[in-house]
Amino acid sequence: MRVMKAMGTLIGWLNGQLSNSDDKQAGRRSFAADREKQLEREIERLRIVNKLIGALNATLNYELVLSLALDLVDEVLIDPAEGAARPKSAILLFEDNQLQVAIARGLSQADMRTRLPGRKGIVAEALNTSEVTVCFQPSQDPELRRLTALQVARVVVCMPLSAGMKMYGVLLFAHRQQEYFSEDRLQLLETVAQQIMIAFQNARLYSELEEEKERIVEIQEEARKKLARDLHDGPAQSISAIAMRINFSRKLLERDPKATLEELERIEELALRTTKEIRQMLFTLRPLALESQGLMAALQQLADKMKETYQQQVHIEAFEDIDESMELNRLGVVFYIIEEAVNNARKHASAKNIWVRMQRSGDLVVLEVEDDGVGFNLEEIQQNYEQRGSLGMVNLQERSELISGLLEIESHRGSGTCIRVTIPLTEEAAAPLHRPGFAA
């Protein structure tokens, strides 16, 4: 009887062990199946990420790069298995010295119109240190609190978009879970941000190159129109007058030979003045002295020709080694800025004197063209400038931008005009030049 009972106990224990073994094997199979599905999801995510990175690097379309960048961030950050809320993301770029939302996911329409100065809080910290910064109280941040969509966020990550000395803007990522951005996620974000920056810089450079080409074409077109206007208002009118006077002299010759002689002298004087005007135009089109003797010599010739042709006093005050401080193509742009400013003063200011001054301050050259003419109300002119036929101020602005210069115009009615262009000699000097509050 005892033997039968022991046998029953043993059989029960064996059945329990077999059942536990089956449960363990089922658990292992379930774990293996879950692991296999997780690996499949990760492989699929990596495939999508790799595809997005390829598309990101393959395009030079500026807007498409921004959109693909946020698609890539979503794929890196979002794990469907977690079931967590989607993070909010945005790319903010500098426009008129303020950060403007270029593209975003999860921000409101009001947020899209919000501008951030980038001078306080974690945004300023990221820009100043060029490092990733994290904020756990975005609602208390002096600038991020302007974005209403971030009021519910518990953590915000800010990454600078920079290349060398050039700062383009920042990447913002936010989530309502404070622990969402783990070390692994931050490392992934930094890796992805590097890819985004490379693609963004390439697209931005390509876009700037296209804009520069269009602007150069516009400048050339305006130069042709200006030449046509100058020829029409100057030599063309003078030659027509010469033809009329010759015809008059031929008729006058039969009646009054002495008066004819006086008329021929006036025709000769007009022809000589026309020749000077044409030579002046040829000089401004291609100042050979600039290529062979340098900017100082070209400016002195400009002053001499202004005196000879228009009786306009132009005084040149510039440091001697100016030609050594800039390349020839930049010197050419500087010359045309001066020529445009001097001609504007001659035509519109009724000035007795025009001063051209150039001085160097470290890695900056400060150019000033000042006159003692009638002056004008700058604000009034700028308000209706688009309706005006003249494009002198536009030419000055565009040529200043070609050499990364900062243009400033000071003028008041009755007290003359001063045009100032601050020109950087290095990339490092150009970076702070266009920041708010710069003073040469």
Image: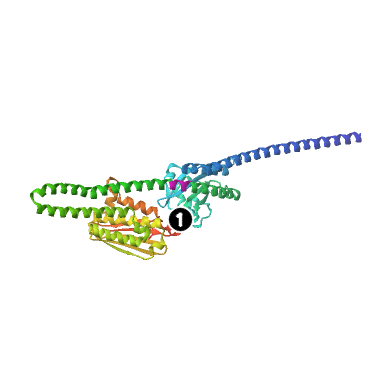
7 displayed left or right of 315: right
User: Where are the magenta residues, as a range?
Assistant: 203-209
Is residue 298 something that shows in the picture? yes
46 displayed left or right of 59: right
Splitting the image into 4 quarters, where does residue 414 fall? bottom left
Residue at horizontal 11 percent and vertical 47 percent from the top: 251
233 displayed left or right of 119: left
Count all numbered tags in the image, as a single digit. Answer: 1
Identify the amino acid type marked 1.
Lys
Q: Which residue is mark 1?
A: 120
Assess whether residue 207 is covered by the magenta stretch.
yes
Taking depth in this image into account, of 248 and 99 the one nearest to the observer is: 248
Assess whether residue 215 is covered by the magenta stretch.
no
Residue 131: image location, x then y, percent: 53, 55
Residue 314: image location, x then y, percent: 27, 61
Residue 160: image location, x then y, percent: 50, 52
Quadrant into which the N terminus falls:
top right
